[in-house]
């Protein structure tokens, strides 16, 4: 697929989504969708590189669109034209997830809660859209490439939304440079899928892990789990059931 014709959706415009959006814009992606319902917070500016002090309190999507237009107009690195930016001003919800991801050729998921991560994984599998998941907590970050039909998928690694207390980056913290490295890995995987990697190179199932303390980036390919509820031999998840995407940390 030609990059200028590619449509990429970013779910989450935070520490991961900001550098990923900038990298995709510089790579010449034709349509860049941004999905987020949050506002710019001063405490996050050190890692959300699209935003400045002047943006604090503004919707992230408005600030991100301004920044992307500014970077595109002033940087000689953008050689293929500025992307058309679509703004989806709401959190991804079960009732609209499959339809939304189906409008795009690839999804980059960098949300900050488990419920959204699993919702994106399931919606992309149902819609037949490839997705690259990314996450970062403290000094560790990961990026996982999943093909249009899964096999393997996000649930092959993480079976379901954790029902016990599991800290996210807001609670446990994250080192700013870690998200930059992980976002770069995420975009690298996404562009490989968009460009069409050589047959000898398997992008789907590639898991990249970055250890910021050790300064080590590892790449390996995971296998499909045959009893996976989403992409296994007898998948049990065939449609989106809203009650399955309740993050205990956000409940009550």
Image: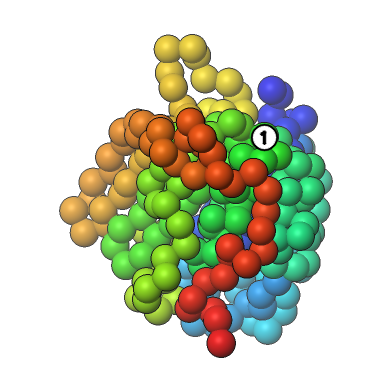
Residue at point 77% right, 30% down?
A: 5
Q: Give the camera-side residue of 166 and 232.
A: 232
Q: Give the camera-side residue of 62 and 242.
A: 242
Q: Is residue 181 left or right of residue 36?
A: left
Q: Residue furthest bottom?
A: 252
Q: Secondary structure at mark 1?
A: loop
Q: Is residue 143 above or below residue 6?
A: below
Q: Is residue 250 above or below residue 177?
A: below
Residue with the mark numbered 1: 128
How far across and down, in percent of the image, does residue 37 sit? 70, 71
Q: Give the camera-side residue of 18 and 186.
A: 186
Q: Which of the 4 image quadrants contains residue 226?
A: top left
Q: Which of the 4 image quadrants contains residue 139?
A: bottom left
| Residue 80 in view in this figure | no
Circle 1 Cα neighbour tier, 10 Å, few/some/many (<14 / 14–19 / ≥20) = some
How far across and down, in percent of the image, does residue 209 sit? 32, 46
Residue at point 58% right, 21% down?
A: 196
Quadrant location of the N terminus? top right
Residue at point 54% right, 57% down?
A: 117
Residue at point 66% right, 36% down?
A: 129
How far across and down, in percent of the image, does residue 76 sit? 65, 41
Q: Give the camera-side residue of 85 and 199.
A: 199
Q: Is residue 15 left or right of residue 61?
A: left
């Amino acid at each position: 697929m030609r990059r200028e014709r590619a449509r990429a959706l970013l779910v989450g415009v935070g520490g991961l989504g900001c550098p990923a959006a900038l990298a995709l814009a510089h790579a010449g992606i034709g349509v860049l969708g941004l999905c987020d319902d949050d506002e710019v917070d001063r405490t996050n500016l050190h890692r959300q590189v699209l935003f400045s002090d002047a943006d604090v309190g503004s919707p992230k999507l408005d600030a991100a669109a301004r920044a992307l237009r500014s970077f595109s107009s002033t940087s000689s690195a953008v050689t293929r034209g500025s992307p058309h930016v679509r703004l989806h001003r709401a959190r991804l919800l079960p009732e609209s997830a499959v339809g939304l991801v189906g409008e795009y050729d690839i999804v980059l998921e960098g949300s900050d809660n488990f419920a959204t991560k699993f919702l994106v994984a399931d919606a992309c599998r149902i819609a037949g859209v490839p997705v690259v998941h990314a996450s970062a907590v403290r000094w560790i970050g990961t990026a996982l490439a999943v093909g249009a039909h899964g096999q393997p998928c996000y649930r092959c690694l993480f079976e379901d939304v954790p029902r016990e207390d599991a800290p996210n980056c807001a609670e446990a913290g994250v080192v700013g440079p870690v998200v930059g490295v992980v976002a770069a890995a995420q975009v690298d995987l996404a562009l490989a899928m968009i460009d069409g990697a050589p047959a000898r190179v398997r992008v789907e199932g590639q898991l990249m892990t970055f250890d910021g303390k050790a300064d080590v980036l590892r790449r390996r390919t995971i296998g499909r789990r045959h009893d996976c509820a989403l992409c296994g031999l007898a998948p049990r998840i065939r449609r989106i059931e809203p009650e399955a995407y309740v993050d205990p940390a956000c409940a009550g």
